[in-house]
Image: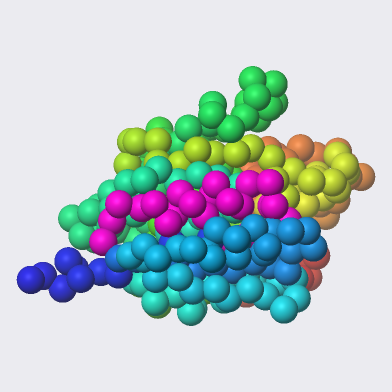
């Protein structure tokens, strides 16, 4: 038997204050029709009845899958919680599951099949956005993941919406070369999706393998708080992508040969709210030329965006 056929799967269930949704989310993992998998549950110190609901579901479970409960003693935040789970999960394939989404019964089996057949670093799927959201919620969200249109670096290296992270599954090999997620304000799909893109090892399953719930923690807070958080995420993602490009032996720096000095000057003196610059323009500035940004970092130019 090929070694790849023995790949083990871990479905990580991340929860935080989701008492109204966690039961259905967990039941969908317990019902997976795959061979035995690990279901790794990590609650991030919820202050409601989320943990109680989890325990109620698991109390009478005697199915084929292995359950690991590793709840946090304090709130770690999304990235630190994910890094903990990535390190401790027993499977080589790690499927990330949100505590308010519902996985299709065949999700683990179909994802494992793609890892065995194609040896990717990332597998993601389509998603059902209609079942768990109102028409108004859907109209307010502009979800246009760039990976659904193209899987080329040229089309995606500026993207801040590559795929819906809740559909993602990763091979642990992705951490061997690039390390774990940076301990900054960012989302795992923007970092790990870019790394898989650099390696050209991405597979999309064109089936709706999750029921995806809009909203959640990423959209909490008032408008100014959300705007500041978005800016901070762009900053962190930009910095990490430059680092990851350098780990790829500068192979992709050729995509932007012309140095645009105006962009560099704008970046150095950039102040988001004072200048009323849109996030779209900020993304263009940050990713206009990786060579420029690397040179600036190596020269230790004191830009507050990379402190």
245 or 39, which is in the foreground?
Answer: 39
State the extent of the magenta-drawn residues as a range: 14-35
**Residue at the location (68% across, 27% down)?**
137
Residue 289 is at least partly visible in this image: no
Q: Tell me where residue 171 appears, x and y as whole percent.
A: 36, 66
Residue sitting nearer the eye, 18 or 296: 18
| Quarter of the image that includes the N terminus | bottom left
> Which residue corresponds to the image point at 45% horizontal and 63% vertical from the top-left?
61
Left or right: 6 as drawn, with respect to 72: left
Q: Quadrant of residue 275?
A: top right
Q: Is residue 30 located in the magenta-colored stretch of the structure?
A: yes
Asked if the magenta segment contains residue 177, the reply would be no
Tell me if 151 is positioned left or right of 189 in this view. Answer: left
For the view shown, which residue lies furthest in the left direction? 1
Q: Quadrant of the C terminus?
A: bottom right
Image coordinates of residue 112 in percent, x first then y, are: 28, 57
């Amino acid at each position: 038997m090929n070694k790849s056929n023995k790949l083990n799967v871990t479905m990580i269930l991340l929860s935080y204050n989701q008492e109204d949704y966690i039961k259905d989310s967990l039941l969908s993992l317990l019902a997976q029709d795959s061979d035995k998998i690990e279901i790794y549950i990590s609650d991030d110190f919820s202050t409601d009845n989320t943990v109680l609901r989890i325990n109620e579901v698991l109390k009478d479970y005697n199915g084929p899958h292995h359950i690991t409960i590793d709840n946090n003693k304090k709130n770690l935040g999304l990235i630190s919680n994910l890094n903990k789970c990535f390190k401790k999960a027993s499977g080589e394939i790690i499927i990330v599951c949100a505590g308010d989404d519902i996985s299709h019964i065949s999700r683990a089996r179909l994802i494992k099949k793609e890892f065995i057949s194609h040896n990717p670093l990332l597998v993601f799927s389509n998603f059902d956005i209609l079942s768990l959201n109102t028409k108004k919620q859907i109209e307010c969200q502009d979800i246009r993941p760039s990976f659904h249109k193209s899987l080329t670096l040229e089309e995606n290296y500026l993207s801040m919406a590559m795929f819906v992270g809740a559909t993602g599954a990763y091979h642990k090999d992705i951490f061997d070369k690039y390390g774990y997620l940076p301990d900054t304000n960012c989302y795992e799909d923007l970092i790990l999706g870019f790394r898989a893109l650099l390696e050209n090892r991405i597979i999309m399953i064109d089936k709706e393998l999750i029921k995806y719930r809009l909203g959640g923690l990423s959209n909490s807070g008032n408008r100014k708080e959300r705007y500041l958080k978005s800016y901070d995420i762009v900053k962190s993602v930009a910095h990490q992508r430059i680092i990851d490009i350098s780990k790829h032996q500068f192979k992709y720096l050729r995509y932007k040969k012309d140095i645009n000095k105006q962009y560099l000057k704008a970046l150095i003196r950039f102040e988001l709210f004072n200048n009323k610059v849109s996030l779209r323009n900020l993304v263009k500035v940050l990713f206009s030329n990786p060579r420029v940004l690397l040179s600036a970092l190596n020269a230790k130019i004191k830009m507050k965006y990379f402190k």
